[in-house]
């Protein structure tokens, strides 16, 4: 036999001992290494602890899931209606204001003089008009003179109203209730006519505009509830309802514009936030469903493991609707079947299993069972470490011998060198070494 083949056989023998010792040590069975080869434990293989849940009937909905940016109901700019110097700013960004609230004031001195002048003209022409009317009644003035004086009085009254409006416009007011989103002026600034001073947004309600395919419009109606999720507020659920449905189809995209009004009762949502909207279009009553985490994908085949009187039974299934953490099973299961939801990744058909107790943590993968995943050490771990066996029964010296034997294979050595360039910690980190070498050990064990 060639030296290379001897090394590989030696590695296979050592890994068999390592894996068997790992499994047995989790169930307080005795196992040990002897000269690089492993002695097998007596009795049958231990049962894997798992968690199982029954397949159950529940209502599942099909959804249209899309994204949108939240938009304010109204977003306006406050413009200066008259020119002047800013003498007082009364609000800051983020302040909630009522409709008609004063936001800032401009200098009023010159305009106050204009008002007083206009008032004086009106007073003067009122007196002239009264005398002219008396004279006309006595036929001392012509009707034309009377009309001319009446015209002058009305003209000056109009000028007075213009001056008063100009005075009112020195106070910049909010035309809608909302929140100050932008302040562009400070005291001392000169504002020209129609120059922007503030922006105000009405955030209650907020809207999200989405587009859905034309073929699905029949399943959407006004008032329909919509689930809303935001990346910036993960874990918090929001809702809305369909406010408007466009009466036309966009010919370019083949979609219809849907406006969703969002519930803003707690004022947590802001315009510009990126949201994911889920619109239910079809609900299936009493669908047979299992948790999504129970379903495994194996070479494009979907399957689950059923807990059947202490034995894991590999069962292919067909999937239907999916909603949240649940997925419909259209064939392969019956209501009440105990489906393994934790610990199934490392199982094979016919493996012995048992339901984990309250204090047990099921092994979710063969790597965890062999000590290759990071976890909190248990009392059994500390006991084994105190005996010099290392965590989960691994002997570092024998592990180094095992690696040396595996690296004698050119293919494994090439893959190891490539991985080492990407992650230099692989050379010294035992957890990463286990993660890298365990798949090769499994293949050798199956051969």
Image (cartoon, grey):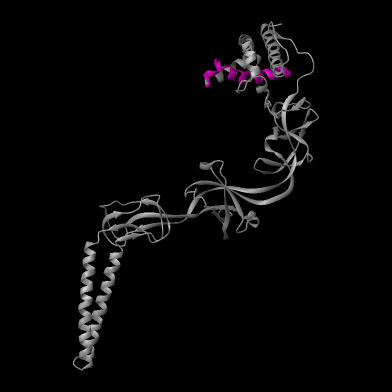
Task: Report if residue 295 is visible in the image.
Answer: no
Q: Is residue 442 magenta?
A: yes
Residue 401 percent coordinates (x, y) = 63, 9
| Residue 145 spot, x, y in % from top left | 21, 87
Residues shaded magenta:
422-447
- Eyeballing the image, is 159 above or below 297? below
Q: Is residue 43 visible?
A: yes
Q: Nearer the viewer, residue 405 or 137?
A: 137
| Furthest-left residue in this view | 140
Where does residue 94 sit, x and y in percent of width and height?
40, 49
* Quadrant occupied by the C terminus: top right
Position of residue 345 in the picture relative to residue 376 (left or right): right
- Nearer-the-camera pick, 103 or 197: 103
Q: Quadrant of the N terminus?
A: top right
Q: Is residue 35 magenta?
A: no
Prevailing secondary structure class for the magenta stretch in the rendered image: helix
Rendering quarter of residue 297? top right
Q: Is residue 195 above or below residue 116?
A: above
Name which quarter of the figure residue 52 lies in: top right
Residue 265, given in percent of the width and then of the height, sits at 52, 52
Please report the residue visible at 69 percent of the width from the left and 41 percent of the height from the top.
327
In the image, is 202 to the left or to the right of 152? Answer: right
Q: Is residue 183 above or below residue 411?
A: below
Q: Quarter-wise, where is residue 427 in the image?
A: top right
């Amino acid at each position: 036999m060639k030296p290379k083949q001897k090394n590989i056989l030696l590695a296979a023998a050592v890994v068999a001992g390592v894996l068997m010792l790992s499994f047995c040590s989790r169930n307080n069975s005795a196992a040990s290494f002897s000269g690089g080869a492993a002695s097998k434990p007596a009795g049958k293989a231990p049962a894997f602890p798992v968690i199982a849940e029954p397949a159950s009937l529940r209502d599942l909905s099909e959804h249209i899931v899309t994204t949108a940016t939240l938009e304010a109901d109204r977003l306006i700019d406050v413009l200066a209606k008259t020119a002047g110097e800013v003498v007082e700013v009364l609000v800051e960004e983020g302040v909630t204001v009522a409709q008609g609230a004063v936001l800032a004031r401009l200098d009023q001195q010159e305009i106050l003089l204009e008002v007083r002048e206009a008032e004086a003209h009106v007073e003067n022409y009122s007196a002239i008009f009264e005398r002219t009317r008396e004279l006309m009644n006595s036929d001392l003035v012509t009707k034309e003179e009377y009309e001319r004086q009446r015209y002058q009085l009305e003209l000056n009254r109009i000028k007075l109203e213009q001056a008063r409006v100009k005075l009112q416009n020195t106070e910049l007011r909010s035309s809608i209730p909302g929140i100050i989103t932008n302040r562009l002026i400070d005291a001392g600034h000169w504002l020209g006519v129609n120059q922007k001073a503030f922006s105000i947004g009405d955030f209650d309600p907020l809207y999200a505009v989405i587009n859905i395919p034309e073929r699905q419009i029949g399943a959407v109606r006004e008032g329909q509830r919509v689930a809303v999720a935001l990346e910036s507020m993960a874990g918090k659920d929001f809702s809305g309802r369909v406010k408007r449905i466009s009466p036309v189809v966009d010919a370019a995209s083949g979609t219809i514009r849907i406006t969703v009004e969002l519930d803003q009762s707690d004022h947590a949502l802001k315009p510009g936030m990126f949201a994911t909207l889920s619109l239910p279009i079809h609900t299936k009553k009493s669908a047979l469903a299992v948790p999504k985490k129970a379903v495994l994908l194996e070479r494009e085949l979907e399957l689950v493991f059923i807990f059947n009187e202490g034995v894991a039974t590999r069962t292919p299934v067909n999937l239907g609707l999916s909603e949240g953490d649940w997925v419909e099973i259209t064939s392969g299961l019956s209501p009440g079947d105990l489906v393994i939801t934790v610990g199934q990744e490392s199982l094979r058909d016919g493996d012995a299993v048992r339901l984990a107790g309250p204090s047990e943590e099921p092994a979710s993968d063969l790597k965890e069972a062999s000590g290759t995943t990071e976890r909190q050490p248990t009392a059994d771990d500390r006991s084994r470490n105190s005996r010099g066996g290392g965590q989960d029964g691994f002997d570092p010296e024998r592990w180094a011998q095992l690696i040396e034997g595996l690296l004698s294979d050119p293919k494994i050595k090439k893959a190891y060198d490539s991985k080492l360039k990407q992650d230099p910690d692989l050379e010294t980190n035992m957890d990463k070494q286990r993660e890298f070498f365990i798949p090769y050990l499994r293949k050798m064990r199956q051969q």
